[in-house]
Amino acid sequence: MTDIDDLVQRVAVRAASDDEDLPAPVGDAQLAQAEARLGFALHPLLTRLYREVADGGFGPEYRLLPLLGPGSSVVGEYLARREASVSVAHPEWPEGVVPILTWGCGMYAGIDCRSADGQVLLFEPNPYSGGSWAECWFLDSDGIAAWLETWLAGTGWFEEDACDRDDVVEPRPWDQAVNRLSSGAGRNTDAQRSPR
């Protein structure tokens, strides 16, 4: 079992060593505003990262998005993705999954705030062939803590040398994608209607 206090501390040390100019962590008011706009609570470990490490700017490859903000942000991206999934036959983005970073080419890492461990998902829209978006959703890690450990160890599929190693665990199809995409279809909450 992962010691979460130790993990957050190790992430903070790595983040500071990767970038001396990290944004300041978010305060309680920013966190409350973000959760009010989302309409649900963020996963507790994700909350700690934004409160104790920085408002994004750290993590794998393209780094975590800021929580709020005028540009691309966790809240802004989630609301835009959910808005595109309301009242359509084939929603692309499930409720409760917040995008935390972009991998480029329309791909996102997201945290499932409905799962106890905060499953880390990969949205990879490039193979989309019409119909259901379920084929574009993959389980990257069973939980955010394990995903962070992979990043800290430099053993993730997203690492530059990943194709040269035999021990890399590739994301696998997310078995909840069909149900989760259909469960949020056609709903439009006040949080989703609020302006970005």
Image (cartoon, grey):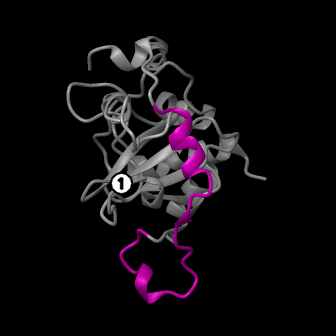
Depicted 184 relative to depicted 174: above or below: above
Viewer-closest of 180 and 89: 89
* Membership of 173 in magenta stretch: yes
Report the quarter where the C terminus lies: top left
Which residue appears farthest toward the left when viewing the image?
71
The residue identified by callout 1 is 18
Depicted 96 relative to depicted 39: above or below: below
The quarter holding residue 99 reads top left
Residue 143 at least partly seen: yes
Magenta segment: 158-185
Secondary element at tag 1: helix
Residue 151 placement (x, y as % from top left): 50, 61
* Residue for point 39% across, 40% down: 89
Q: What amino acid is labelled 1 in the image?
A: Asp
The quarter holding residue 81 reads top left
* Residue for point 61% across, 43% down: 118
* Membership of 18 in magenta stretch: no
The quarter holding residue 90 reads top left
Whether residue 174 sits left or right of residue 85 in the image: it is right
Residue 37 at least partly seen: no
* Residue for point 35% across, 54% down: 18
Residue 175 placement (x, y as % from top left): 62, 57
Residue 102 placement (x, y as % from top left): 32, 50
Viewer-closest of 36 and 174: 174
Whether residue 129 sits left or right of residue 143 in the image: it is left
